[in-house]
Image (spheres, grey):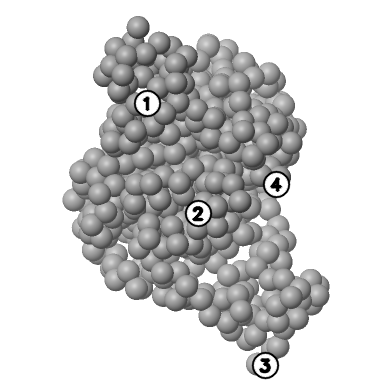
């Protein structure tokens, strides 16, 4: 159970595939246009329920409850050995040419 | 009619209410509009804009000479060649990019007009810039981003920008790939009655004019001479337009305005598949060329970003070259900045070699870097998405399939685009077979393309357009 007032992320479908305009690439037209919004849950709910949240600007938005306490996990990526080699080239050309 | 079409049909009234500008009154002739009137009616002087920006943490960024990068560039130049390369360190604006300049005037104006909030549709630094400025003014802020592909995989750079927007207190609406982002923007504008902080409104351009003014003043102060060229990373065209207007406001001398974009040829900007196979979310040809040849495809009826009026030369560089120069900037100069802002730096490294060593080239922006944006984050993500990363000749890079890092700094080459071809495409886009153009329309096209009546007329003849022309 996720308590009322919890900061959550919801997902909704803005346009189904058959509602999307014709002038976009086929690969995009075959999939729905999804939308993610974050806000405070206005009633207790479970993941997967259709819920309403209150956003920071004061909008009430409905969607499927996806994540409680959403955070950020983007990072500096995996080690890329080529970048170290780029640096070697640059330093070598600075010092030896 | 469904909600999508209904909302789009109200586009003009929604825009008029949310930007506070009646665009209809600037229309004249059959295709022309009063471009300068759009700016002058706002009544801001450059001095007023500078004062507002200084009050809100924007502008007066340092111009820095990149002595070590210049020295490296000279190793590949003919004797006596290799212009001095300078960089305007715009990452030092509050919110970390030159976009703060644009946001500062949009938010200031929103506050003056009595709006309680601002809406902006952007996946780029502009979102954080508007969110930051909105926080200073006590305005509510909604940022609408195109962020994920249909598998829910987010571009790390855009996720970082969402984080920044949320840090500044904005509500971020994240969408999957598609141009219907515009539909969502209209819906939100209608629902909230907030101000539309469009990148393409005249406020969005006025704010950058100070960048052009400052870099001329800074350059004269540091060196005693004017720059030969100023290189602007080009996407929607506002950066180049505003910078050029600022330069022309303070000097009549011939300072070359050069646009630079990352070459993303072959990738479709509205493709769910291609979306996560590009390593640059802005500063690329996928925005640069369509917006240059058809500026009014933007989110306002008439875009104030019209780069073809000012640009002297347009070059491309490849993704691998920009990542390489991003590493050079940190390795040689000790300045760690985000990759997209370094597009023009990569171009400058090549173009400096064409000029005598006493000339000056200015790279007019940098942007902050960090998790998601960092070049290692982007290269790592590209590899995960199946992009081949290897060393070789960057000219063999195939966007969406490979990223080719130069085997040597000497392989970094800015490639010229044919500006006359781009001018002709603009004329084709702004005219139609059904409209007979008059002299004022032709004069407008001359201004739009920064060309001559003869060029416009020849192009109209080629395109079989009808016109009435008297000298």
Determine which residue is flagged by label 2: B299
Tell me the element at label 2.
loop
- Indicate which disc, 2 or 3, sits on the residue closer to the N terminus: 2
Tell me the element at label 4.
loop
Residue pictured at 71% horizontal, 39% vertical: A25
Q: Nearer the viewer, mark 2 or mark 4?
A: 4
Instruction: Determine which of the numbered discs, if any, sits on residue B26 in the image.
Output: none
Task: Give the Cα distance between marks 1 and 3.
Answer: 64 Å
Would residue B99 be found to the left or right of residue B431 on screen? Answer: left
Q: Is residue B115 above or below residue B265?
A: below
Determine which residue is flagged by label 1: A52
Determine which residue is flagged by label 3: B470
Task: Give the Cα distance between marks 4 and 3.
Answer: 40 Å
Disc 3 is attached to a residue of which chain? Answer: B
Residue pictured at 37% horizontal, 26% vertical: A52
How packed mark 4 is, by other alpha carbons closer than 10 Å (few <14, some 14-19, many 20 or more), is few
**Tag 2–tag 3 contact (CB < 8 Å):** no
Residue that extends furthest to the top in the rendered view of this protein: A1
Determine which residue is flagged by label 4: A23
Task: Give the Cα distance between marks 2 and 4.
Answer: 17 Å
**Tag 1–tag 3 contact (CB < 8 Å):** no
């Amino acid at each position: 159970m996720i308590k009322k007032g919890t900061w959550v992320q919801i997902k909704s479908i803005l346009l189904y595939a058959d509602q999307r305009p014709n002038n976009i690439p086929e690969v995009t037209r075959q999939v729905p246009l999804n939308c993610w919004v974050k806000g405070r849950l206005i009633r207790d709910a479970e993941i997967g329920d259709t819920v309403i949240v209150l956003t920071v600007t004061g909008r009430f938005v409905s969607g499927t409850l996806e994540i409680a306490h959403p955070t950020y996990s983007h990072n500096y990526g995996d080690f890329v050995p080529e970048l170290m080699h780029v640096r070697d080239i640059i330093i070598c050309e600075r010092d030896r040419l | 009619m469904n909600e999508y079409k209904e909302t789009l049909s109200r586009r003009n009234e929604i825009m008029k209410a949310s930007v506070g500008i009646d665009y209809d009154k600037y229309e004249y002739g059959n295709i022309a509009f009063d471009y300068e009137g759009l700016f002058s009616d706002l009544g801001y002087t450059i001095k007023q804009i500078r004062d507002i920006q200084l009050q809100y943490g924007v502008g007066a960024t340092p111009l820095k000479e990149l002595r070590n990068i210049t020295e490296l560039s000279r190793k590949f130049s003919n004797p006596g060649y290799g212009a001095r390369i300078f960089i305007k360190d715009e990452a030092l604006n509050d919110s970390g990019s030159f976009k703060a300049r644009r946001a500062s005037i949009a938010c200031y104006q929103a506050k003056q007009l009595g709006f309680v909030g601002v809406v902006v549709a952007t996946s780029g630094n502009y979102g954080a810039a508007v969110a930051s400025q909105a926080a200073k003014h006590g305005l509510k802020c909604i940022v609408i981003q195109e962020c994920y592909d249909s598998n829910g995989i987010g571009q790390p750079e855009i996720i970082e920008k969402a984080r920044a927007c949320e840090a500044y207190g904005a509500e971020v609406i994240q969408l999957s790939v598609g141009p219907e982002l515009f539909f969502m923007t209209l819906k939100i504008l209608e629902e909230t009655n907030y101000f539309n902080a469009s990148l393409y409104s005249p406020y969005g351009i006025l704010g950058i004019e100070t960048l052009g003014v400052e870099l001329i003043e800074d350059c004269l102060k540091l060196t005693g001479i004017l720059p030969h060229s100023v290189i602007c990373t080009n996407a929607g065209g506002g950066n180049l337009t505003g910078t050029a207007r600022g330069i022309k406001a303070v000097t009549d001398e011939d300072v070359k305005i050069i646009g630079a974009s990352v070459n993303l040829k072959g990738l479709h900007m509205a493709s769910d598949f291609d979306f996560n196979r590009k390593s640059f979310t802005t500063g690329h040809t996928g925005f640069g060329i369509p917006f240059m040849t058809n500026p009014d495809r933007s989110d306002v009826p008439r875009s104030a970003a019209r780069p073809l009026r000012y640009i002297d030369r347009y070059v491309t560089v490849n993704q691998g070259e920009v990542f390489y120069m991003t590493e050079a900037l940190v390795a040689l100069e000790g300045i760690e900045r985000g990759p997209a802002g370094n597009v023009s730096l990569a171009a400058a490294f090549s173009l400096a070699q064409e000029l005598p060593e006493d000339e000056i080239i200015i790279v007019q922006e940098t942007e902050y870097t960090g998790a998601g944006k960092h070049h290692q984050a982007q290269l790592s993500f590209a590899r995960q998405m199946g992009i081949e990363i290897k060393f070789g000749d960057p000219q063999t890079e195939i966007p969406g399939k490979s990223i080719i890092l130069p085997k040597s700094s000497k392989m970094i080459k800015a490639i010229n685009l044919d500006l006359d071809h781009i001018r002709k495409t603009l004329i084709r886009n702004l005219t139609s077979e059904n409209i007979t153009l008059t002299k004022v329309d032709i004069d407008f096209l001359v201004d739009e393309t920064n060309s001559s009546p003869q060029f416009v007329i020849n192009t109209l003849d080629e395109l079989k357009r009808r016109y009435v022309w008297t000298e």
